[in-house]
Amino acid sequence: PAYLAGFEWALGQGYDIICEMDMDGSHRPADLVRLLDAMRRDRVVDLVIGSRRVQFGRDAGMALVP
C-alpha cells in the first residue's frame, strides 16, 4: 500500500516522526498538534495513537501487540 511506501521513504530520509491519517475528512489535521505535543513531552514514546473510540483517553482494555 501507498502508506507503507511513504513510511519507508520517510525513514530513509531520517525523519523522527511519521504521521498517518485518513484524508476523507474523518480525521482532523488540527488534532495532530495534540498527538505531537504528547510525543514531545515524553521523548521515550515510540508510538502515539489517537482514536475516536477510546473513552476519556484510556486504553479501555485494548491490548497492544509487540
Image (tube, rainbow, N blue to C red):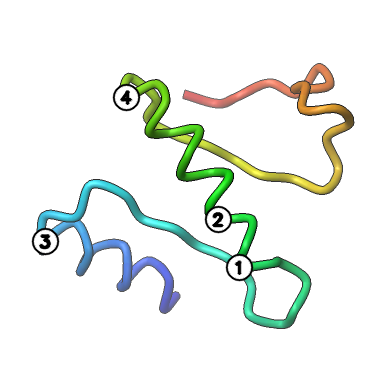
Secondary structure, mark 3, is helix
Quadrant of the image occupied by residue 9: bottom left
Q: Is residue 55 above or below residue 36?
A: above
Along the polypeptide, which appears first: circle 4 or circle 2? 2
Residue 12's disc number:
3
Along the polypeptide, which appears first: circle 3 or circle 4? 3
User: Residues under labels 3 and 4: Cα distance?
Assistant: 21 Å
Quadrant of the image occupied by residue 31: bottom right
| Residue at left offset 74%, top offset 79% | 25
- For badge 1, the amino acid type reads Pro
CA neighbours of label 4 inside 10 A, class few (<14), some (14 to 19), many (20+): few
User: Residues under labels 1 and 3: Cα distance?
Assistant: 24 Å
Q: Which residue is mark 2?
A: 32
In this view, the residue in front, 26 or 5, is 26
Along the polypeptide, which appears first: circle 4 or circle 1? 1
User: Residues under labels 4 and 1: Cα distance?
Assistant: 22 Å
Q: Quadrant of the N terminus?
A: bottom left
User: Residues under labels 4 and 2: Cα distance?
Assistant: 16 Å
Q: Which residue is mark 1?
A: 29
Find residue 3 and report its horizontal and vertical position in percent: 43, 71
Q: Are marks 2 and 1 in contact (CB under 8 Å)?
A: yes
Along the polypeptide, which appears first: circle 2 or circle 3? 3
CA neighbours of label 1 inside 10 A, class few (<14), some (14 to 19), many (20+): few
Find residue 15 and report its horizontal and vertical position in percent: 19, 55
